[in-house]
Image (spheres, rainbow, N blue to C red):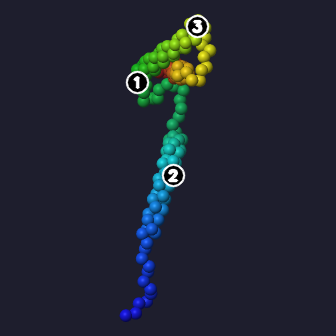
Amino acid sequence: MATFGSPSPPVSPSLSRRRTKTFARKCERYCCSVVTYFPLVFVYGLTTWAALTGVEEKNGAVCENCRPRFGELYQKTLSKTSELEVRFARLWTQCQRCQGSMHNTVICSARDCPIFYMRMKAKKDVEDAGKELVRFDQDIAAW
């Protein structure tokens, strides 16, 4: 019986293994690309949505939906600010004790001191909470 072509050579195991590895590498590369760029796509989509829907930054402390809870939100913000101020004061006092003088300003700038970094973060938190509290003062219509 005559055949029209020569039989194909058998596929070697190393060739199929190589194809599997190549496919696995491509899958890994695509997955890494997706994981890398997903946060960027998410943030871009979120900002685009905010721009399209017309989300506006108002000077007031609360939105129209939260107006009935104005007093409660003000009290929460006030207590949070007070707690942050107490934390900063305690860290400041600890730095003064470390320095050896309770009556002078703290001139510590030790980069290896964990209290220094906690004090700087507490200072920033107090400033941010103060700004948030000032927004309640600007919202005269709610008072």
Circle 2 sits on which residue?
33
Residue 45 falls left or right of residue 105? left
Q: Secondary structure at mark 3?
A: loop
Residue 28, given in percent of the width and then of the height, sits at 47, 55
Circle 3 sits on which residue?
101
Circle 1 sits on which residue?
68
Indicate whether 67 appears above or below 12: above
Among all residues in the image, which is located at the extreme bottom?
Answer: 1
Indicate whether 81 appears above or below 12: above
- Give the distance between the C-alpha atoms of the residues marked 3 and 2, in whole angstroms: 56 Å
Indicate whether 20 appears above or below 4: above
Q: Nearer the viewer, residue 121 or 116?
A: 116
- Amino acid type at image mark 3: Ser
Which of the marked residues, 1 or 3, is nearer the chain's N terminus? 1
Looking at the image, is mark 2 or mark 1 nearer the viewer?
Answer: 2
- Give the distance between the C-alpha atoms of the residues marked 1 and 3, in whole angstroms: 49 Å
Name the residue rendered at 45%, 29% in the picture: 64
Residue 3, given in percent of the width and then of the height, sits at 41, 90
Q: Which mark is residue 57?
A: none
Q: Secondary structure at mark 2?
A: helix
- Amino acid type at image mark 2: Ser
Q: Nearer the viewer, residue 37 or 114?
A: 114
Residue 58 falls left or right of residue 20? right
Looking at the image, is mark 3 or mark 2 nearer the viewer?
Answer: 3
